[in-house]
Amino acid sequence: MYDAYDGLIFDMDGTILDTEPTHRKAWHLVLAQYGMTFDETAIIGLNGSPTWHIAQVIIASQQSDLDPYRLAEEKTALLKTMLFESVQPLPLIEVVKAYKGRRPMAVGTGSEHSMAVGLLQHLGLLNHFDAIVGADDVKRHKPEPDTFLRCAELMGVPPARCVVFEDADFGIQAARAAGMDAVDVRLL
């Protein structure tokens, strides 16, 4: 089905791994410590953004003076304790399995590199990918193209010969900005 492409790039959270509900639960628990809440719809709209950026948006909406980087660290630490117990692959993982060894594949995620590696290793999927690019591997994040351009570079595939699988508007924009075709998995 995707044989026309020389490289396949997958977002991780909400695309190949069902992590979104656990991410939201971790936000609720961390923010409750500060008497704060968040608008789930607004947070879903930020999917694909680095955790510190989401923390910035939440803090601004609450008119708080918390440090977004510290809040992001707290959320990530809590998430790590929860995610390994609950994470499951999503149906798109079948595409990953079908193309293993047939095409170079990469994960381009807004999560930290170590989190992506840990989750994929935990599920026995790490060896399916030739490259992992996390939020801490690039300076500019989705909707900027840097994450996906770095994936293409690490796979040794020209960007125009890659297809990106995404579940977030920022990711679709990033893929297009990188000159790549994009598959919106929300429409599959």
Image (cartoon, grey):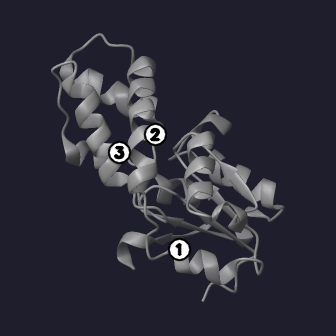
Give the residue at x 38% y 22%.
71
* Label pair 1/3, CB-CB below 8 angstroms: no
Specify few, some or many for label 2: CA neighbours under 10 Å numbering under 14, 14-19, or 20 or more: some
Instruction: Decide if residue 95 is in sight here.
Output: yes
Residue designated by label 1: 93
Label 3 to label 2: alpha-carbon separation: 10 Å
Category of crowding for the residue at label 3, using alpha-carbon neighbours closer than 10 angstroms: few (below 14), some (14–19), many (at least 20): some
Q: Quadrant of the C terminus?
A: bottom left
Question: What is the secondary structure assignment of the residue under circle 1?
Answer: helix
* Closer-to-camera residue (117/85): 85
Q: Could you tell me if residue 45 is visible in this image? A: no
Would you identify the image quadrant in which residue 96 lies? bottom right
Q: Can you identify the residue that label 2 sits on?
A: 80
Is there a contact, CB below 8 Å, between mark 1 and mark 2? no
Relative to 154, residue 5 above or below: below
Q: Nearer the viewer, mark 3 or mark 2?
A: 2
Residue 43 located left or right of residue 138: left
Tell me which amino acid carries mark 2: Lys
Q: Amino acid at mark 1?
A: Ile
- In three-dimensional space, the C-alpha distance between marks 1 and 2, rounded to whole angstroms, equals 21 Å
Mark nearer the N terminus (3 vs 2): 3
Q: Residue 33's image quarter?
A: top left
Q: Which mark, residue 23?
A: 3
Helix, strand or loop for disc 3 = helix
Q: Quadrant of the N terminus?
A: bottom right
The amino acid sitting under disc 3 is His
Residue occupying the point 48% across, 37% down: 50
**Residue at 52%, 43% in the rendered image:** 111
Q: What residue is drawn where x is 23% and y is 35%?
A: 28
